[in-house]
């Protein structure tokens, strides 16, 4: 998956009297730290921070992988999205208790390398807070994920869609309850990265949000297929073709007459 980082200085500098001007942008791969430095050909330097939370970025990567025809990668990223969502929930709840970031990081360190520990921490924390255990992935979906990640299984396109939908079905009710009960902490956690980057940088920063298929599926109650259609259209506008499960190609073949 690639995102487009625009040089805002190029765009801002041009007076409205000019009928056209060149605006530079950088197409680049997603970075783990969410920070994108750009020196455009005019010499303008800018720093852009991706505001979209990590679990939504991973879901977007999974959706793009699906449209690119990388089916194993799609399930791996959908699964990673769900794991990071559990972390997001833990952090939001800790924030709502005014626990220091230093304390959270110290505790997180002991579970950061084992996803089963994180799942356990999430499940119990949610149960204590809400009084009901959260709905988790079904055994069938866990088995599919394990086969893909640990046994090299190549899933079908439909299995990827089913897995993506199962992830939405787990996240959606939790997200709604969290928005209802921990609205302020939820917003704070979403802005945590861009805020910490802003504090460390002296120059002004640009914040960027990308189209989030997960957010559209949850907040706009769209089906995964509709979200993928929207993503497909966005890619088309950027000149990126979408393959999905297959692409039918028509090629005109010119025969060279045989010499007799
Ligand atoms: Zn520029």
Image (cartoon, helix red, strand yellow):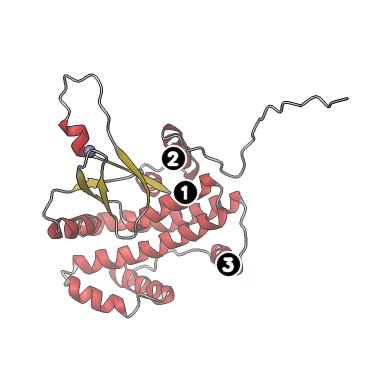
- Tell me which residue sits at (18%, 60%) in the image: 196
Is the CB atom of the residue marked by disc 3 within 8 angstroms of ligand 1's nearest atom? no
Badge 3 density bin: few <14, some 14–19, many ≥20, Cα 10 Å? few
- Tell me which residue sits at (21%, 42%) in the image: 43
Asked which secondary structure carries label 3, the reply is helix
**Which residue is labeled 1 in the image?**
63
Nearest the viewer among 5 and 255 is 255
Furthest residue in direction front, as rendered? 260
Question: Which quadrant of the structure image shows residue 216?
Answer: top left
From this view, report whether residue 63 is shown above or below residue 20: below
Q: Quadrant of ligand 1?
A: top left
**Which residue is labeled 3 in the image?**
143
Q: In the visual, does 210 lie left or right of 223? A: left
Pick whichever of labels 1 and 2 is earlier in the sequence: 1
Nearest the viewer among 188 and 37 is 37
**Which residue is labeled 2 in the image?**
231
Asked which secondary structure carries label 2, the reply is helix
- Tell me which residue sits at (33%, 43%) in the image: 26
Viewer can see residue 125: yes
Q: Position of residue 222 (x, y in %)?
A: 42, 42
Furthest residue in direction left, as rendered? 202
From this view, report whether residue 69 is shown above or below residue 256: below
Pick whichever of labels 2 and 3 is earlier in the sequence: 3
């Amino acid at each position: 998956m690639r995102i487009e980082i625009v040089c805002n200085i190029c765009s801002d500098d041009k007076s409205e009297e000019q009928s056209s001007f060149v605006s530079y942008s950088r197409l680049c791969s997603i970075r783990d730290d969410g920070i994108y430095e750009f020196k455009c050909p005019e010499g303008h330097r800018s720093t852009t921070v991706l505001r979209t939370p990590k679990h939504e970025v991973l879901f977007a990567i999974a959706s793009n992988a699906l449209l690119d025809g990388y089916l194993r990668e799609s399930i791996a990223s959908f699964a990673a999205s769900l794991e990071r969502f559990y972390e997001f929930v833990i952090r939001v709840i800790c924030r709502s208790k005014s626990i220091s970031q230093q304390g959270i990081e110290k505790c997180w360190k002991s579970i950061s390398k084992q996803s089963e520990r994180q799942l356990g921490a999430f499940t119990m924390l949610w149960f204590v807070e809400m009084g009901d255990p959260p709905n988790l992935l079904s055994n069938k979906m866990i088995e599919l994920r394990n086969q893909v990640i640990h046994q090299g299984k190549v899933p079908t396109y439909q299995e990827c869609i089913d897995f993506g939908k199962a992830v939405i079905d787990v996240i959606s009710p939790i997200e709604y309850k969290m928005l209802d009960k921990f609205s302020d902490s939820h917003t704070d956690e979403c802005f945590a990265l861009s805020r910490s980057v802003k504090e460390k940088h002296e120059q002004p920063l640009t914040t960027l949000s990308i189209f989030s298929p997960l957010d559209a599926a949850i907040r706009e109650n769209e089906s995964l297929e509709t979200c993928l259609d929207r993503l497909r259209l966005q890619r088309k506008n950027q000149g990126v073709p979408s393959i999905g499960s297959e692409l039918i190609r028509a090629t005109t073949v010119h025969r060279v007459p045989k010499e007799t």
